[in-house]
Image (tube, rainbow, N blue to C red):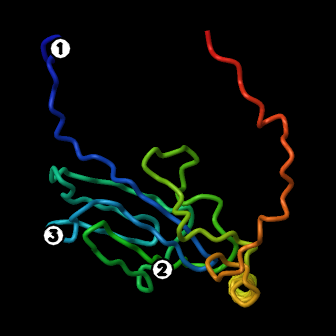
Amino acid sequence: MGKEGEIIQDDQPVAPAVYWAQRDDVLILTIQVEDIDRDKNRKVTLNEKSLSFSGKGGAENKDYKCDITFFKDVDVEESKYNATARGLKFLIKKKEKGPYWTRLTSEKMKLHWLRTDFSYWKDEDDSDDEDQQRDANLEKLMAQMGESGGGLGDGDAPSMDDLDDEKDSDDEELPDLE
């Protein structure tokens, strides 16, 4: 036990930020640890029930570790990952294609380091056709705006000559402050 006011260094590994999203057949996971691609001693173990990671990274070359026990089984042979300067990116195949999992982990408790990856998130009831249709509609709308002068800078700015010259209550002078 340290003296009062003394900071005790704890060499225990830290849980990295983990982001996840899913489709009906895959999980998309990112373990965010900078410079993990340089750590040749990192350990990644994936089995049908869990994922385990440990390694060193970040500006301070800290030890990181996390263990995830999946909600359901995954297909190890069809899964893959890639190490980048920003972290590890996983594409993990679910053993059974079907409805979205209600959560990533088998535990019902909230894990402070586990977050939803909204850059990959897609609701279960969204279909690929709906996404493509939305993108097509947006492109069509943008094209129409360009053709009809809906943008600014084409010299088609509206004239302001027909605005009333009447004074309104906003134009009155304010009394001096005391």
Q: What numbered label is drawn on residue 38?
A: 3
Front residue of 117 and 90: 117
Of residues 31 and 13, which is closer to you in this image? 31
Say which amino acid is labelled 3: Arg
**For residue 74, side relative to residue 140 (left or right):** left
Instruction: List the residue tagged with mark 2.
Output: 75
Give me the residue at 37% from left, 56% from top.
67
In this picture, residue 9 sits left or right of residue 65: left
- How much space separates mark 1 and mark 2, taking CA atoms? 50 Å
Q: Quadrant of residue 104?
A: bottom right
Q: Looking at the image, tell me whether mark 3 or mark 1 is earlier in sequence order.
A: 1
Q: Residue 71: x percent and y percent?
A: 56, 61
Q: Hey, which quadrant is residue 39 in on the image?
A: bottom left
SS at circle 2: strand
Question: Is the residue marked by circle 1 packed among few (<14), some (14-19), or many (20+) residues within 10 Å?
Answer: few
Task: Give the number of the disc on residue 5.
Answer: 1
Spatial distance from mark 3 to mark 1, Cα to Cα?
36 Å
Residue at 55%, 44% in the rendered image: 109
Image point 42% across, 64% down: which residue? Answer: 50
**Mark 3 Cα-neighbour bin, 10 Å: few <14, some 14–19, many ≥20:** some
Q: Is residue 70 above or below residue 12?
A: below
- Residues 134 and 55: in front is 134
